[in-house]
Image (cartoon, rainbow, N blue to C red):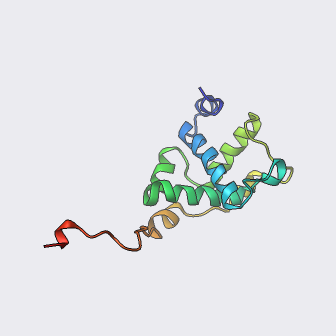
Amino acid sequence: MKDYHKLAIDDGRYSPYAFQFLFEGLDHAVKLHKRHQREGAARHVSGQELIEGMKAYARELFGPLAAYVWRTWGIRETIDWGNIVFLLVDAELLTRQDGDTLDDFRSGFDFDREFVETYEPKLPPELPRSPLDEG
């Protein structure tokens, strides 16, 4: 069992899936902010950069269902992601910089507005012709 899974179970507020998604979203945020080839502190992303990366990653994975998925994991607002980050920091599964605080996650966004109301499906530039069109 992964260390974060036990941490999630022991804490009880959030699904282990949220912890897993946070790690995946962190990788996405590091790439989004072009820090993936850096090492150590130079690779660090702020709380707001992490939220931005996780939002983009959630859109890719879940589309307009992202808000629903996050809520099923116990994530009701962006501060919940901060709570998970600091649980992981306390368990020494993530590191933080001196200036990082839980407040970095407070000025988040409305999940329904970001994921549902502004959702636009991405279609290929040209759809393939259907066999029914030839006739």
Judge from the rendering whether residue 82 lies leftward or rightward of residue 77; answer left or right. Answer: right
Name the one closer to the observer, 130 or 81: 130
Q: Residue at x 60, y 34 (%)?
A: 8
Relative horizontal placement of residue 103, taking residue 60 as reference (left or right): right
Is residue 82 positioned above or below 48 on the image?
A: above
Horizontal side of residue 98 vs 49, given as left or right: right
From the viewer's perspective, is 98 left or right of 108? right
Q: Position of residue 81 (x, y in %)?
A: 64, 49
State how many labels appear: 0
Outermost residue to the front: 134
Q: Quadrant of the C terminus?
A: bottom left
Which residue is rendered at x = 60% and y = 41% of the image?
19
Q: Position of residue 109 (x, y in %)?
A: 59, 63
Query: Which part of the image, by quadrant, shows the N terminus?
Result: top right
Residue sticking out furthest to the right: 98
Q: Nearer the viewer, residue 106 or 48?
A: 48
**Residue 34 in picture, x, y percent from top left:** 72, 60
Q: Quadrant of residue 56?
A: bottom right
